[in-house]
Image (cartoon, rainbow, N blue to C red):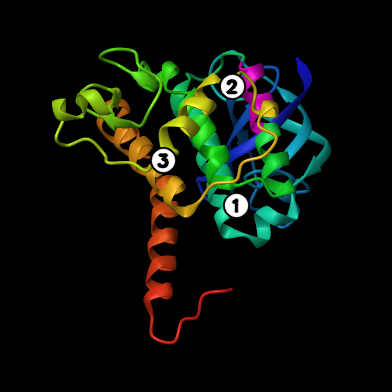
C-alpha cells in the first residue's frame, strides 16, 4: 500500500552498479531502509531529493520488515548551510547517527524525528552546533542504558559548590569527595552545570540560546567522549570526522604567521 510520509535522509550507500540503499528517519514509521533502483542513472528524477540531510515529504511503499520503496517526492529541502559548512554537515550527520545507533529499525520514533527537525532549524539559525549535538548525546544516554549524574555529588548528593566528573563513579563528585578519584577530570566550573541543564530539558525547543566558551566546550567533549567510548561503546564515523576537523583547526592556529581575530 502506498503511503505519504515525512522523513529526513540519514545516509545513502551504493548497492550494485546503479542502485542505492537510502536510510531515512521517518516521522510516521521510524528508521527505514529504502531501495532505490537506478538511482545513479542520469535520468533518475529524485537524485537531489535523496541526498543526506534532506528533509522531505515522500510517497512510497512501507514494508514492516525488509526494504521499503520511494515512488514520488512531494516536497523536499536541503538547507544551503549544510552544503556550504562542512562542520554543520558533520554535526547534523552525527546527531542522526546517534539516533540510528540508539534505536532499532522499524519502530515509530516521532519524538526523535521532531527533535532532529528542531536541531536542523536551530543549527541553521546559528545555535552552536556542538551544543546541539551535546543535547542529543546527553538525552540519548538512557536509551543506551547509561545514566551518569551531572548535577549532584553521587556520594552525598551535594549540589552546591564546585563539582568534578568521575568515570569511576559514573557521575559528579563534590570537592569534599574529590580525593576518592585521583583520575577525575579536573573540569572548569561551568562544564557540569551545562551538562546537567541539558539533561533536565525535555524538548530541544526549550534551549533558546547556548553561549559556551571554548574551555567549557572542550570539557563537555572530554566527558561525553569518555562516556560514549567507555560505557556506551558507540564510536561513529561522523564523530571521528568532527574530531579530525578540530585537530586540523588547532594545527592551523599554531602555524607561524597565524593571527587570531580580535
Which segment did they paint magenta? 109-116
Quick check: 232 above or below 133? Answer: above
Dividing the image into 4 quarters, which one contains the N terminus? top right
For mark 2, what is the residue? 201
Q: Main secondary structure of the magenta part?
A: helix
Outermost residue on the bottom side: it is: 257
Using the rendered view, name the quadrant where residue 52 is placed: top right
Q: Is residue 12 left or right of residue 101?
A: right
Mark 2 Cα-neighbour bin, 10 Å: few <14, some 14–19, many ≥20: few
Q: Is residue 115 magenta?
A: yes
Give the residue at x 70% y 33%. 118
Task: Compare marks 3 and 2 and give the one earlier in the sequence.
Answer: 2
Q: Secondary structure at mark 1?
A: helix
Q: Is residue 175 left or right of residue 116?
A: left
Residue 32 in the image: x percent, y percent? Answer: 59, 25
For mark 1, what is the residue? 88
> Marks 1 and 2, how far apart in space?
22 Å
Using the rendered view, name the quadrant where residue 165 is placed: top left
Q: Secondary structure at mark 2?
A: loop
> Marks 1 and 3, how far apart in space?
18 Å
Task: Compare marks 1 and 2 and give the one earlier in the sequence.
Answer: 1
Task: Compare marks 1 and 3 and give the one earlier in the sequence.
Answer: 1
Give the residue at x 62% y 28%. 25
Dividing the image into 4 quarters, which one contains the C terminus? bottom right
Q: Is residue 80 magenta?
A: no
> Marks 3 and 2, how far apart in space?
17 Å
For mark 3, what is the residue? 220
Give the residue at x 65% y 43%. 53
Total label count? 3
Mark 1 Cα-neighbour bin, 10 Å: few <14, some 14–19, many ≥20: many
Q: Which mark is residue 30?
A: none
Amino acid at each position: 500500500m502506498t503511503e505519504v510520509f515525512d522523513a529526513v535522509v540519514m545516509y545513502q550507500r551504493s548497492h550494485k552498479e546503479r542502485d542505492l540503499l537510502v536510510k531515512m528517519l521517518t516521522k510516521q514509521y521510524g528508521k527505514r531502509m529504502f531501495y532505490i533502483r537506478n538511482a545513479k542513472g542520469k535520468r533518475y528524477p529524485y537524485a537531489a531529493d535523496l541526498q543526506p540531510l534532506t528533509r522531505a515529504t515522500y510517497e512510497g511503499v512501507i514494508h514492516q520488515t525488509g526494504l521499503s520503496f520511494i515512488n514520488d517526492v512531494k516536497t523536499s529541502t536541503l538547507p544551503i548551510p549544510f552544503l556550504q559548512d562542512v562542520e554543520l554537515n558533520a554535526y547534523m550527520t552525527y546527531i542522526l547517527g546517534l539516533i540510528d545507533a540508539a534505536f532499532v529499525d522499524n519502530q515509530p520514533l516521532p519524538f526523535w524525528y521532531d527533535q532532529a527537525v528542531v536541531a536542523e532549524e536551530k543549527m541553521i539559525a546559528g545555535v552552536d552546533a556542538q551544543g546541539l549535538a551535546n543535547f542529543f548525546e546527553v538525552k540519548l544516554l538512557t536509551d543506551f542504558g547509561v545514566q551518569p549524574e551531572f548535577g549532584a555529588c553521587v556520594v552525598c548528593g551535594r549540589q552546591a559548590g564546585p563539582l568534578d566528573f568521575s568515570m569511576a563513579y559514573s557521575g559528579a563528585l563534590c570537592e569534599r569527595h574529590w580525593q576518592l578519584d585521583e583520575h577525575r577530570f579536573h573540569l572548569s566550573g561551568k562544564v557540569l552545570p551545562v551538562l546537567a541543564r541539558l539533561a533536565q530539558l525535555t524538548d530541544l525547543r526549550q534551549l533558546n540560546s547556548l553561549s559556551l566558551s571554548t574551555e567549557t566546550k572542550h570539557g563537555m567533549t572530554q566527558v561525553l567522549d569518555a562516556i560514549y567510548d567507555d560505557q556506551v561503546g558507540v564510536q561513529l564515523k561522523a564523530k571521528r570526522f568532527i574530531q579530525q576537523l578540530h585537530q586540523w583547526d588547532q594545527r592551523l592556529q599554531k602555524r607561524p604567521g597565524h593571527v587570531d581575530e580580535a
